[in-house]
Image (cartoon, grey):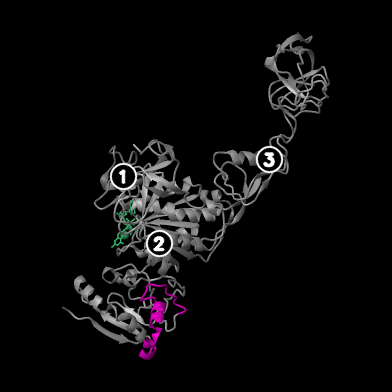
């Protein structure tokens, strides 16, 4: 058995472990218990202090014994220096003992054989220059719970920005109102007929024909009447007042002549005499069968302001203008040509990976084309060994657009540090929220975190979450210095509305696995997008429905809580209420697990399965149908 080699240099404890995993594990276990003590000693504390009872507290502060949070700036003797970006980050990472490697937190540096202590580089992420053999062998990012991760996102999402939007069908649907909208005009603005027919004057109330409730007068109105005027649904000159015993022909929506009290439908009349020209009506007869309802005062008339009264609040701040059309219709009806809304964030979607091929990439020259004639009918590129079609980008662009956000397709970035950096820089100029997929896990080509931290001076707020799928989900903010007013030069900008970008861009580094990417988009990116777009808190993120009954047994993951892709429907069987069926295999690479899924079931981690009929919470992604699993 090889022996660990240990020593102290300046304030760093240096331990060299053997290369074999077994040997390393055994040796590490042997020295593990003494490490906290050694670190504190290396930091310069004398052993008397250590043994005077302060050790537990100091260990806790150093975050090495209990896994408590490390606060770099408050721990005395803190010795690591930040890299040259001068950007402080990583201080809120809490490290479980087993996940803290060579990063010099707290008092004295604990240096593992894989990580150089003197590079002065970022203490958290891999330096891509070091290559695969010297990368971190375990993630330096603490594993957050889903709730903790959501809280970080909430903390770092800027407040929504108010803009003035034109009320029209192209830009307004999807926007959230930033003000109460008060009707400036009465709707209708004039007394209007509800039907095609004849305006009449119901004779004034008498004791004899009073309604039982006394509310309005009525009359059989049976008889022959002269047609004295015509009112069409077009703005016209002032009309002559109508008197008792006269009628005016009127069309639906047309203004009533002054004095008219009711309108009789054309179906309830017959033509009696024609005018001399033989075309115009001279007299009509109002028919009223025995027992037919009498003509009531106000019948078939829309009074001024009876739909909407001027001064009434028609829409409230925080309401979303839907694409169903009701809200836009309302705004237009009350004369609101512009409203204050929250600017919608522009969402960019970038795929990463050398193996990723655009779905529409044409065949390469050596592949030829389907017709044999160059230039036309070029067929799709055939996949070479190791290549994968880019399914994440179209899926995420669709998901973001469906939620009403303007999107920018940012293409595919290669797994080269320079290429990724350039793609990210370009992207951050063009969008408010950047969504990337791939390159966030532990491979030597997983470059997203180091590029965001080292090259862009961003802060990774979390890099791992205890959930399945989506474990390596990463959330970062990147300050962008040259904030220019957003010009409406792109379609997405025009859709978002005028305004200024916040300097801090949000970056969601989603896992490359297709199911992981879509699930984490809904779980993590959507709440941030909702908040930026001004959604009130109760409507942020996917709606959560408690108590959905399982339609069959569900196996649980032992290690991680799971968001299980499922179909939630109105139960046709036992209980009524809602029930959930799995969409089948849940492997993270299986994008098909989201086909037809309208919900993510929140399953706890655990040993045994959850049984049919047990109830869980569901996060709704889509609409709920009636009856059973998907076909
Ligand atoms: N040693 C470890 N390996 C892995 C861990 C771990 O904890 N330790 N986590 C695993 C988990 S969980 C996930 S999820 C993945 C995340 O991978 P990355 O985010 O680093 O993504 P890539 O490595 O780039 O690709 C993973 C997978 O997804 C495919 N992919 C990527 N982009 C796309 C796309 N746009 N369209 C379709 N498919 C895509 C890619 O080809 C790979 O098959 O890491 C595990 N590994
Ligand atoms: O977390 Mo990954 O998304 O399980 O495969
Ligand atoms: Mg990877």
Characterize the local packing of mark 2: few (<14), some (14-19) or many (20 or more) Cα atoms within 10 angstroms. some
Characterize the local packing of mark 1: few (<14), some (14-19) or many (20 or more) Cα atoms within 10 angstroms. few
Query: Which of marks 3 and 1 precedes in the sequence?
Result: 3
Query: Which of marks 2 and 3 precedes in the sequence?
Result: 2
Characterize the local packing of mark 3: few (<14), some (14-19) or many (20 or more) Cα atoms within 10 angstroms. many
Q: Which of 627 and 11 is in front in this view?
A: 627
Figure check: 565 above or below 262: below
Q: In which quarter of the image is ligand 2?
A: bottom left
How far is the residue under mark 3 from the one under mark 2? 48 Å
Residue stretch in magenta: 45-74
Name the residue beneath numbered marker 3.
Answer: 334
Q: Examine the image and state in which quarter residue 413 appears.
A: bottom left
Q: In which quarter of the image is the N terminus?
A: bottom left
Can the viewer see residue 117 in this picture? no
Residue at left 40%, top 61%? 145
Name the residue beneath numbered marker 1.
Answer: 584
Query: Which of marks 1 and 2 precedes in the sequence?
Result: 2
Left or right of residue 285: residue 29: left
Q: Residue 145 carries which label?
A: 2
């Amino acid at each position: 058995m090889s022996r660990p080699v240990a020593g102290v240099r300046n304030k760093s404890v240096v331990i060299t472990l053997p290369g074999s995993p077994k040997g390393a594990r055994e040796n590490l276990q042997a020295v593990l218990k003494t490490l906290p003590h050694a670190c504190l000693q290396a930091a310069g504390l004398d052993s008397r202090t250590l043994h005077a009872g302060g050790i537990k507290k100091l260990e806790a502060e150093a975050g090495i014994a209990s896994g408590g949070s490390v606060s770099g700036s408050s721990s005395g003797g803190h010795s690591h220096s930040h890299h040259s970006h001068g950007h402080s980050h990583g201080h809120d990472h809490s490290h479980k003992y087993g996940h803290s490697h060579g990063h010099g937190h707290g008092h004295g540096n604990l240096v593992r054989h894989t990580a150089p202590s003197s590079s002065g580089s970022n203490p958290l992420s891999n330096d891509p220059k070091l290559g695969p053999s010297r990368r971190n062998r375990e993630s330096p990012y603490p594993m957050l719970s889903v709730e903790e991760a959501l809280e970080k996102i909430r903390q770092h999402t800027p407040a929504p920005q108010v803009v003035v939007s034109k009320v029209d069908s192209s830009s307004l649907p999807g926007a959230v109102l930033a003000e109460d909208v008060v009707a400036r005009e009465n709707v209708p603005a004039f007394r209007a007929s509800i039907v095609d027919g004849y305006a009449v004057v119901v004779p004034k109330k008498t004791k004899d024909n009073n309604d039982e409730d006394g509310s309005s007068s009525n009359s059989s109105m049976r008889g022959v009447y002269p047609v004295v005027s015509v009112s069409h649904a077009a703005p016209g000159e002032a009309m002559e007042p109508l008197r008792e015993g006269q009628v005016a022909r009127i069309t639906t929506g047309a203004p009533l002549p002054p004095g008219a009290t009711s309108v009789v439908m054309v179906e309830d009349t017959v033509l009696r005499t024609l005018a001399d020209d033989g075309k115009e009506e001279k007299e009509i007869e109002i028919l009223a069968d025995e027992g037919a309802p009498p003509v009531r005062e106000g019948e078939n008339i829309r009074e001024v302001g009876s739909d909407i009264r001027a001064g009434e609040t028609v829409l409230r701040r925080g309401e979303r203008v839907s694409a169903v059309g009701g809200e836009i219709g309302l705004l237009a009806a009350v004369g609101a040509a512009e409203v204050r809304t929250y600017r919608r964030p522009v969402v960019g979607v970038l795929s990463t990976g050398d193996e990723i091929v655009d779905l529409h990439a044409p065949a390469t020259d050596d592949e030829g084309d389907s017709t044999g004639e160059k230039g036309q009918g070029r067929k799709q590129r055939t996949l070479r060994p190791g290549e994968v079609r880019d399914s994440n980008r179209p899926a995420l662009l669709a998901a973001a657009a469906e939620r009403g956000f303007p999107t920018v397709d940012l293409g595919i970035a290669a797994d080269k540090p320079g290429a990724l950096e350039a793609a990210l820089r370009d992207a951050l100029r063009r969008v408010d929220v950047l969504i990337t997929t791939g390159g966030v896990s532990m491979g030597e080509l997983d470059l997203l975190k180091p590029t965001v931290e080292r090259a862009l001076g961003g802060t990774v707020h979390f890099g791992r979450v205890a959930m399945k799928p989506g474990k390596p989900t990463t959330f970062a903010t990147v300050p962008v210095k040259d904030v220019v007013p957003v010009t409406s030069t792109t379609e997405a900008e025009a859709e978002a509305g005028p305004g200024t970008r916040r300097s801090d861009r949000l970056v969601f580094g989603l896992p490359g696995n297709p199911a992981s990417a879509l699930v984490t988009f809904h779980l993590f990116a959507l709440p941030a997008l909702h908040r930026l777009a001004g959604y009130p808190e109760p409507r942020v993120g996917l709606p959560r429905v408690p108590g959905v009954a399982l339609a069959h047994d569900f196996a649980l993951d032992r290690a991680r809580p799971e968001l299980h892709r499922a179909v939630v429907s109105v139960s046709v069987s036992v209980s009524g209420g809602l029930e959930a069926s799995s969409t089948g295999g849940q492997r993270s690479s299986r994008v098909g697990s989201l086909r037809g899924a309208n919900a993510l079931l929140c399953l706890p981690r655990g040993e045994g399965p959850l049984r049919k009929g047990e109830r869980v919470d569901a996060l709704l992604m889509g609409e709920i149908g009636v009856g059973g699993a998907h076909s």
